[in-house]
Every structure is written in C-alpha cells, then in structure tokens.
C-alpha cells in the first residue's frame, strides 16, 4: 500500500521560504509512482495543482508559482520536495502530496502553510 506523508509546513512571513517534503513508502521505487505532485487547497476553494514531476524528470507548475516554487525528488530517500520561495499570503493553504500508480491516486494527509502579510 502506497503511503505519502508530508512535512515541513508552518507559519512564515511574506517573502520567506519553506521546503515541504513528501516521504513515499509502500513501493520499491519512487519512479513507479508517476507523476508525483503537490496540490493545495485554501479554505472555501477547490484543490488545485501546484507542481508535478514525472518519472522522467519533467516538471510542470501552476502559473502563479512559476519562478518561485521548485519541485524535486531524491530517489535514494524516496522523497519528493517542494521548495517555496518568495511566499505570498495567497499561498496560504493546506498542501497535499499526490501520486499515481496503476490508475490509482494516492494522497497524503496534508500540511498547513500559512503566510502572514
């Protein structure tokens, strides 16, 4: 059973940085989960894609985070990261890790990111 566990959220001032981590377990290789990504959901809003990384290393970002956020992975640690720089109050949300394998989607429990003005 694939499990995704996020960490690294918290409270930060606008302009600051955070790095989120998503530890992947229940699979022999992180490359078997394709793609891996981060979504976020603000109160009263839908869950939106933030960034994804494919098994081949390709990445894609939401327009409003391009140039500020970077998704990466460490296959030795079975972990995917989201480096978030130049954070804005509108980045405040619960951030979820997502992975897909064998036509099934897996989600983590989410980690709260709060950016104060």
Image (tube, rainbow, N blue to C red):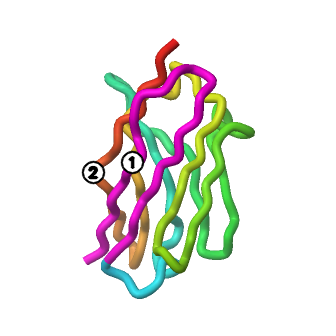
Q: Residues within 10 Å of mark 1 (few under 14, many from 20)?
A: many
* On screen, residue 45 above or below 85: above
Q: Position of residue 22 (x, y in %)?
A: 42, 59
* On screen, residue 82 above or below 40: below
Mark drawn on residue 96 = 1
Frontmost residue, 50 versus 71: 71
Q: Magenta span covers which residues? A: 1-25
Please give the name of the residue rendered at 37% of the width and 54% of the height, measured from the top-left corner: 6
42 relative to 63 in the view: left or right = left
Please give the name of the residue rendered at 67% of the width and 36% of the height, measured from the top-left corner: 63
Frontmost residue, 29 versus 9: 9
33 relative to 4 in the view: left or right = right
Please give the name of the residue rendered at 52% of the width and 19% of the height, measured from the top-left corner: 89
Please give the name of the residue rendered at 48% of the width and 27% of the height, measured from the top-left corner: 12
Q: Position of residue 29 (x, y in %)?
A: 47, 84
Frontmost residue, 8 versus 106: 8
Q: In which quarter of the image is residue 9?
A: top left
Q: Where is residue 45 in the image (x, y as percent from the top left)?
A: 38, 27
Q: Where is residue 19 in the image (x, y as percent from the top left)?
A: 53, 46
Q: Is the magenta stretch mostly helix, strand or loop?
A: strand
94 relative to 69 in the view: left or right = left
Which quadrant: the N terminus? Answer: bottom left
Q: Residue furthest right?
A: 67
Q: How crowded is mark 2: few (under 14 residues within 10 Å), some or many (20 or more)?
A: some
Frontmost residue, 14 versus 24: 14
User: Pointer 2 and pointer 1: residues touching (CB < 8 Å)?
Assistant: yes
51 in the magenta segment: no
Q: How many marks?
A: 2
11 in the magenta segment: yes
- Disc 1 on helix, strand or loop? strand
Residue topped by disc 2? 109
- Disc 2 on helix, strand or loop? loop
């Amino acid at each position: 059973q694939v499990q995704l566990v996020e960490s690294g959220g918290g409270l930060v001032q606008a302009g600051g940085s955070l790095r989120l981590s998503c530890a992947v377990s229940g699979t022999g290789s992180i490359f078997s989960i394709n793609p891996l990504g981060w979504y976020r959901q603000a109160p009263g809003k839908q869950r939106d894609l933030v960034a994804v990384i494919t098994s081949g290393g390709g990445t894609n970002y939401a327009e409003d985070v391009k140039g500020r956020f970077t998704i990466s992975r460490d296959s030795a640690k079975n972990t995917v990261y989201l480096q978030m720089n130049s954070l804005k109050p509108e980045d405040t949300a619960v951030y979820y890790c997502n992975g897909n394998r064998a036509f099934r989607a897996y989600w983590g429990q989410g980690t709260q990111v709060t950016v104060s003005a």
